[in-house]
Each structure stands twice: as structure tokens, then as C-alpha cells.
Amino acid sequence: MTQQGNQKAHHGDALGDALVFDRDKRSDRRLYRELYGLSYEQVLTFHSATVDGGLFLVLNAHATMLADGKTPSNDLKVAFESFLD
């Protein structure tokens, strides 16, 4: 059970984290933007405007790599940056 909780805590969840921010449970907006590349408000807007899970897969993978102290692969960097352009 503890391992499952640790795994969840170390894997990016752009939408889940955005909902926590939206409920005023977190205030470190700089860290959110660093991990996901977007503000939590933007993520909530994208979620309500799209059913494309690809965006969230890329955002979550990017955040997971950074949270684990790893460098994202070039492919992930390209995909991540393409969403930000």
C-alpha cells in the first residue's frame, strides 16, 4: 500500500494537481508551471475543451521525469514543447 502511494505521488497528474490548486489546497504555482509547462488554469481549460488524452500523457510524463530527477528524452522534450507553442 505504501509503495502504491509513493508511486502515485511521484507520477505526474496534470489534471489531478490542477484540481488541487483549483480548490486552494496548493499555492506553489511556479512549481506547477515548471513541471507541466502550463498554469493549472490552462490545464483545466484544456481538459474541458478537449477529449484528447495525448496532451495529458505528455504533460504527465514530463512532470514525472522532472519529479524523479531525470532528464526528459529528446522525443518527450519535442512533444512537450510542441504543446507549448
Image (cartoon, rainbow, N blue to C red):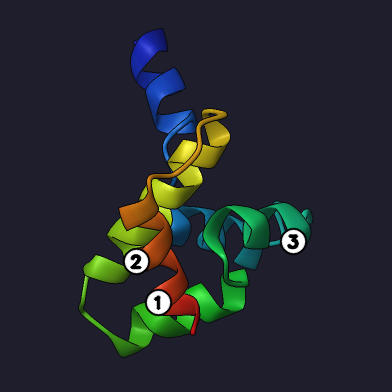
Q: Say which label, 3 or 1, has the lower sequence index.
A: 3
Marks 1 and 2: in contact by CB < 8 Å? yes
Which of the pair 81/55 is nearer the observer? Answer: 81
Give percent across and percent down for residue 66.
Answer: 55, 40
Q: Is residue 14 left or right of residue 66?
A: left
- Circle 1 sits in a helix, a strand or a loop, which is it? helix
- Circle 2 sits in a helix, a strand or a loop, which is it? helix
Give percent across and percent down for residue 81.
Answer: 46, 70
Q: Which residue sits at x=57%, y=29%?
A: 69
Residue 30 versus residue 38 in the image, above or below = above
Q: Say which label, 3 or 2, has the lower sequence index.
A: 3
Asked if one can make out residue 23 in the rendered structure from this viewpoint, the answer is no
Q: Amino acid at mark 1?
A: Ser
Give percent across and percent down for residue 17.
Answer: 53, 54
Residue 37 versus residue 46 in the image, above or below = above
Q: Amino acid at mark 3?
A: Arg
Q: Which residue is mark 1?
A: 82
Asked if one can make out residue 67 in the rendered structure from this viewpoint, the answer is yes
Q: Is residue 2 left or right of residue 39?
A: left
Task: Tell me if mark 1 has few (under 14), some (14-19) or many (20+) residues whose alpha carbon lies within 10 angstroms of its own.
Answer: few
Q: Amino acid at mark 2?
A: Ala
Considering every residue shown, the one lying at the far bottom of the view is: 49
Q: Which residue is mark 3?
A: 29
Give percent across and percent down for residue 34.
Answer: 65, 56
Q: Which residue sits at x=39%, y=24%?
A: 7
Q: Which residue is mark 2?
A: 79
Whole-angstrom CA distance, mark 2 to mark 1, is 5 Å
Q: Which residue sits at x=41%, y=10%?
A: 2
Q: Which residue sits at x=49%, y=30%?
A: 9
Whole-angstrom CA distance, mark 3 to mark 2, is 22 Å
